[in-house]
Image (cartoon, rainbow, N blue to C red):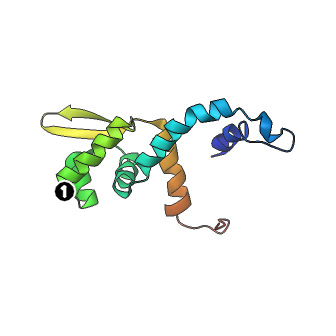
Amino acid sequence: MDTILNNLEAFLPSQDRPADDVDTDSMSGHAKEASSFLKALGHEGRLMILCHLAGGEKSVTDLERLLSARQASVSQQLARLRLEGLVSYRREGKTIYYSLASNKARQTIGLLYNMFCAPATGNNTEN
């Protein structure tokens, strides 16, 4: 997370650098990509798929069982995740296996897990 914050600080204004010195062209160029990424994560079903895949490769049947969802629904969500480049797949006979293909997805799922799912410790602060 420190890496993310350090990279973000390079774009955000600080007391030493006024807001009009921010590279808005660079920020604007990445906004569409970031928005598309967040939209893909913004669906509960897709987010759950990514969370399960963060633990390792899963077959479509595994995901159906883990999500208690029908094959058509799981396949639709996987198609969107493939389109966004967040998952990859391989075929072994009749079985298709999916895994995370994006380091951005892996890092974001880790961050979301720490923020929302990890057991609370004494030094966590709620915002």
Q: Quadrant of the C terminus?
A: bottom right
Q: Position of residue 83 (x, y in %)?
A: 34, 36
Image height of 12 relative to 122, above or below: above
Determine whether, in the image, residue 26 is placed left or right of residue 102: right
Determine whether, in the image, residue 113 is placed left or right of residue 59: right
> Which corner quadrant of the image does residue 82 belong to?
top left
Residue furthest left as drawn: 94
SS for dot 1:
loop
**Residue closer to the observer: 3 or 40:** 40
Determine whether, in the image, residue 52 is placed left or right of residue 8: left
Q: Where is residue 119 in the image (x, y as percent from the top left)?
A: 53, 66
Q: Position of residue 96 (x, y in %)?
A: 21, 39
Residue occupied by mark 1: 70
Query: Dot 1: few (<14), some (14–19), or many (≥20) neighbours within 10 Å?
Result: few
Q: State the residue at coordinates (33%, 55%).
A: 45
Q: Is residue 57 visible?
A: no
Q: State the residue at coordinates (27%, 58%).
A: 66
Image height of 83 relative to 50, above or below: above
Residue furthest right as drawn: 16
At label 1, the amino acid type is Arg
Q: State the residue at coordinates (64%, 30%).
A: 26
